[in-house]
Image (cartoon, coloured by chain):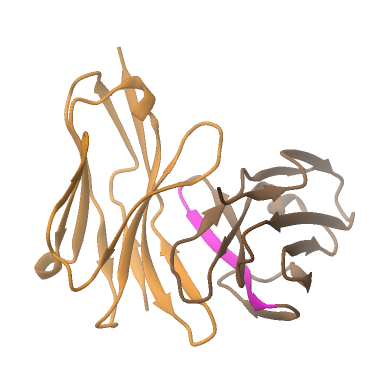
């Protein structure tokens, strides 16, 4: 069965600190996708990144970077020089092919609090 | 811009009431999903639909039903609301071959 583990329930950092959010997954699929979503206080989940299982290159987008390591089944997310606007709940998700629709299995989320 | 809208941001209902949560998307997506979000449990899939009038149970379908009469609209129904259904409900949609889901703003339902 699919499983996504986000062991960090809550992280608190001071602005400008770097922070890494961990994500570990389990799947029997050979082809799969991994996602990160951000949920700000407004409630709507916002897509951040999608990674497919054949592409282990790290990705950087501004202050955000993602480290995908298939050997350890991890897809970690780092925010460099955090800002107050980064405060949100972050979800990692794993694709699951059901034959009828493409589903996502979500982790339990990590709440990030960035303070001044 | 993809838009997923949900009929209410906040809803308060009494135990035993029938509750309808509506979701509409404007991107002609084939797939639509209903999740509930609870602290410490993340997002759990209730039901999903891959076509008009087609639906499948997710991980926690008990106490819920759904309806998809039109492609753009997916309704979640609580036949007889109970206090343990107090939660945040999120709707999402996606294209048929895409795993990327677009989410609505959520409905925070309180059942008293």
Q: Nearer the viewer, residue A35 or B79?
A: A35
Rendered-image quadrant of the C terminus of chain A: top left
Residue at the image position 19 percent from the left and 60 percent from the top: A74
In the rendered picture, chain B carries what hue?
brown
The count of marks equals 0
- Residue A56 to residue A83: above or below: below
Q: Is residue B41 magenta?
A: yes
- Residue B96 to residue B108: above or below: below
Which residue ends up furthest to the bottom in the rendered image? A99
Picture quadrant where residue B99 is located = bottom left
| Residue A65, x across and y down, in percent | 19, 44
- Residue B24 to residue A18: above or below: below
Which residue ends up furthest to the right in the rendered image? B17
Picture quadrant where residue A111 is located = top left
| Residue B66, x across and y down, in percent | 75, 70
Which residue ends up furthest to the top in the rendered image? A116
Residue at the image position 22 percent from the left and 36 percent from the top: A62
Q: Is residue B28 magenta?
A: no
Tell me: B64 left or right of B18: left
Chain assigned orange: A
Tell me: A34 left or right of A102: left
Tell me: B94 left or right of A86: right
Residue at the image position 75 percent from the left and 63 percent from the top: B73
Q: Nearer the viewer, residue A69 or B83?
A: A69
Rendered-image quadrant of the N terminus of chain A: bottom left
Picture quadrant where residue B81 is located = bottom right
Majority secondary structure of the magenta segment?
strand
| Residue A64, x across and y down, in percent | 23, 39
The range drawn in magenta is B40-51
| Residue B93, x across and y down, in percent | 58, 62
- Residue A96 to residue B94: above or below: below
């Amino acid at each position: 069965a699919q499983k996504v583990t986000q062991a960090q329930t809550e992280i608190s950092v001071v602005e400008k600190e770097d922070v890494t959010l961990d994500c570990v997954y389990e799947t029997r699929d050979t082809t799969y996708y991994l996602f990160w979503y951000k949920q700000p206080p407004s409630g709507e989940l916002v897509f951040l990144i999608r990674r497919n299982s054949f592409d282990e290159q790290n990705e950087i987008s501004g202050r955000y970077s993602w480290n995908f390591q298939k050997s350890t089944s991890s897809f970690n997310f780092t925010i460099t020089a955090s800002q107050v606007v980064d405060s949100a709940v972050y979800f990692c998700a794993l694709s699951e092919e059901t034959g009828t629709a493409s589903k996502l299995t979500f982790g339990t989320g990590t709440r990030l609090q960035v303070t001044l | 811009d993809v838009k997923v809208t949900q009929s209410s941001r906040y809803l308060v209902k009494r135990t035993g009431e029938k509750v309808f949560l509506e979701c509409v998307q404007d991107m002609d997506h084939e797939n639509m999903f209903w999740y509930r979000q609870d602290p410490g449990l993340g997002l759990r899939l209730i039901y999903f639909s891959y076509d008009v009038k087609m639906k499948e149970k997710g991980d926690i379908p008990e106490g819920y039903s759904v309806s998809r009469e039109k492609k753009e609209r997916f309704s979640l129904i609580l036949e007889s609301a109970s206090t343990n259904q107090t939660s945040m409900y999120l709707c999402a949609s996606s294209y048929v071959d895409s795993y990327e889901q677009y989410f609505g703003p959520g409905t925070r339902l309180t059942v008293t």
